[in-house]
Amino acid sequence: MIGFINKHYSKVLALCFAVLFVNSALASQFKVGDTVFVAYPAANIKDDAFIIGKVKQVLPNGDYKISVIDYVEGHDYGVSCVPMVKNESATSSKDELSQVWDMWTDTTKLNKEELDYVVSKKDVVDLGYGKTSFIERNNLYIVFGRWKSDAPMLNVERIAKAEQQAKAVGLADMNPAFELAKLHRASFYGDFGRPLMPFESIKPLVSALKAIEALFTEDKELKNIWFAKQRDWKKLSKNTKYYFMVEAIDKVVEDSKSQLYEEDIDKADPKDLNQLKQLVTEFSRK
């Protein structure tokens, strides 16, 4: 019954987002005075950025000149926004545009008092849809972060629900990492959230590391990325699947290694214990 409910919930969530997306897409042109959401989603989610603004002008090509109401600081808006002096035409000359850039020296901050900004129509969505989408994205990031920080109340069922949500909001590339999270969680917590004894975790950790081993066999690029002596995190942050997979594998491998130093692990099946030691050695990054 629970599985049916979760499956039904996933379908409903996906349908809701599909309807919201269609409604947003059908609103092919917002009008002057509309409050809109300008979305700049990032593959790693933590660098998501957005602007909430009021449409001041619709350009002939469909782009929008907006006055900024709120925004996320830290994102470089210089590559996606064109500054305009307030009350100035968005069709100003090149000389005028070059002068206004002198008023916007720090492109990680938006000058709400003196400047308006021209944003691409492809980044502008309905305010409600944008807020809902980014909240869902952030919720998924929180679940992943809670797993990494060993939050005691996070169970396998909650991670499975996150997988459904990720699929519904277009973040299915997170799910391979969530699959590893479930295997890891099952290695430390049993039925009804009971913490496993250290020796009880050995066998399921072997299964988790074997799953990673299989992933490396299937995906050579993932293997090369994970074993690299120096990881290019800037490049990784642009790929949802690999960014979260690398972090998930790090977590599983490090916790497997630490478990070998816990007390009473000699109570585990010697075969499982030796296999875990061998796998930990294989996953050593030199």
Image (spheres, grey):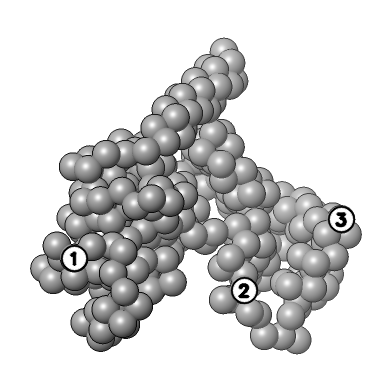
Query: Which one is in front, 272 or 37?
Result: 37
Q: Is residue 68 above or below residue 186?
A: below
Name the residue rendered at 72%, 72% in the picture: 226
Image coordinates for residue 24, horizontal then vertical, percent: 41, 33
Type of amino acid at the residue the image marks with label 2: Lys
Q: CA distance from mark 3 to mark 1?
A: 56 Å
Q: Are marks 1 and 2 in contact (CB under 8 Å)?
A: no
Q: From the viewer's perspective, is 254 left or right of 266? A: left
Name the residue rendered at 85%, 65% in the picture: 220
Q: From the viewer's perspective, is 145 left or right of 268? A: left
Residue with the mark numbered 3: 218
Type of amino acid at the residue the image marks with label 3: Glu
Between discs 3 and 1, the one toward the N terminus = 1
Type of amino acid at the residue the image marks with label 1: Glu
Q: Quadrant of the C terminus?
A: bottom right
Number of other residues with Cα within 10 Å of mark 3, as a class: few under 14, some 14 to 19, many 20 or more: few
Number of other residues with Cα within 10 Å of mark 1, as a class: few under 14, some 14 to 19, many 20 or more: few
Q: Is residue 148 above or below residue 56?
A: below
Q: Is residue 251 above or below residue 165?
A: below
Query: Which one is in front, 246 or 108?
Result: 108
SS at mark 3?
helix
Image coordinates for residue 54, horizontal then vertical, percent: 21, 49
Residue with the mark numbered 2: 235
Residue with the mark numbered 1: 88
Q: CA distance from mark 2 to mark 3?
A: 21 Å
Q: Which of the two marks, 3 or 1, is nearer to us in this view?
A: 1
Q: Are marks 3 and 1 in contact (CB under 8 Å)?
A: no
Between discs 1 and 2, the one toward the N terminus = 1
Q: Quadrant of the N terminus?
A: top right
Image coordinates for residue 230, horizontal then vertical, percent: 67, 85
Q: Which of the two marks, 2 or 3, is nearer to us in this view?
A: 2
